[in-house]
Image (tube, rainbow, N blue to C red):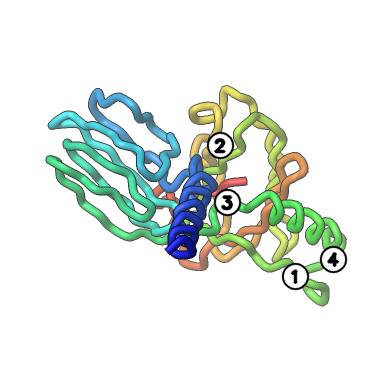
């Protein structure tokens, strides 16, 4: 019996540790809000378990980052889940959009590895040299990038020469002080292109889907460092 009790306590302890490790990790982002709801704002990341109360005529659009569900929720009480929301006393219209679920943000280890790999191959040409494989696919030609602070953002196309943007980002250009939206400056990337984004010491290689339209839901075009 003592063995069983110890095993049970160990399992519970493991679950508690796992929950603590996952705490604070965003699972969705608010794409749009209308009304006077409190506790949530436009372009805010939300965590699993968060409860949001909407008035009868309030509406919120929520994009899940891993499951790629896009929810339009009207009224009621919303409990954010890992892959979709639970809605009580309200209505939800749910559609799955194209997004690179689960690969939208690199871990610190992946960012460091990515920077090292790209630094070693920066002098190589796409033809005849080693290509760097995309880590993330975006499904719109007008990305929105989570840069968190104003900085110099370098965007270079690496599958073909010539396309290069060096953007000096000012805080006033950021949405909610965090997001740089290419739509604000009418900048459009090329469908099918492979790009390297460099921000400070971090680098990400991403691809624009071959059939990507200019604009798409937020989860389809969001790039997170």
The CA distance from mark 1 to mark 4 is 8 Å
Say whether marks 2 and 3 touch (CB < 8 Å): no
Query: How busy is the neighbourhood of tag 3: few (under 14 within 10 Å), some, or many (20 plus)?
Result: some
Marked residue nearer the N-terminal end (3 or 1): 3
Marked residue nearer the N-terminal end (2 or 3): 3
In the image, residue 87 lies at what x, y percent? 20, 45
Query: How busy is the neighbourhood of tag 1: few (under 14 within 10 Å), some, or many (20 plus)?
Result: some
The CA distance from mark 3 to mark 4 is 26 Å
User: Circle 3 — which element?
Assistant: loop
- Judge whether residue 163 can be spotted in this image: no
60 lies left or right of 9? left
- Name the residue furthest bottom: 128
User: Circle 2 — which element?
Assistant: strand
According to the picture, the residue beneath numbered tag 3 turns out to be: 105
Front position among marks 3 and 1: 3
36 or 213: nearer the viewer: 36
According to the picture, the residue beneath numbered tag 1 turns out to be: 131
- Judge whether residue 90 can be spotted in this image: yes
According to the picture, the residue beneath numbered tag 2 turns out to be: 180
Note whether 44 is above or below 98 in the view shown: above
According to the picture, the residue beneath numbered tag 4 turns out to be: 124
Front position among marks 2 and 3: 3
Say whether marks 3 and 1 touch (CB < 8 Å): no
In the image, residue 136 lies at what x, y percent? 58, 60
């Amino acid at each position: 019996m003592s063995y069983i009790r110890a095993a049970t306590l160990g399992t519970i302890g493991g679950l508690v540790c796992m929950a603590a490790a996952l705490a604070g990790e965003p699972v969705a982002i608010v794409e749009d809000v209308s009304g006077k709801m409190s506790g949530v704002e436009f372009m805010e990341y939300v965590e699993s378990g968060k409860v949001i109360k909407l008035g009868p005529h309030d509406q919120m659009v929520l994009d899940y980052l891993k499951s790629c569900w896009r929810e339009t929720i009207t009224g009621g009480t919303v409990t954010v889940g890992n892959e979709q929301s639970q809605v009580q006393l309200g209505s939800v219209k749910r559609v799955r959009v194209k997004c690179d679920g689960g690969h939208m943000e690199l871990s610190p280890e992946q960012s460091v590895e990515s920077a090292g790999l790209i630094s070693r191959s920066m002098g190589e040409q796409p033809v005849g040299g080693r290509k760097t494989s995309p880590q993330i696919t975006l499904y719109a030609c007008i990305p929105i990038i989570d840069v968190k602070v104003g900085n110099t953002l370098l965007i270079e196309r690496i599958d073909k020469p010539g396309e290069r943007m060096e953007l000096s980002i000012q805080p006033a250009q950021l949405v909610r002080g965090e997001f740089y939206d290419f739509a604000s400056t009418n900048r459009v990337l090329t469908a099918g292109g492979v790009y390297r984004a460099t921000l400070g010491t971090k680098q990400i290689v991403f691809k624009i889907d071959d059939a990507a339209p200019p604009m798409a839901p937020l989860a389809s075009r969001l790039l997170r460092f």
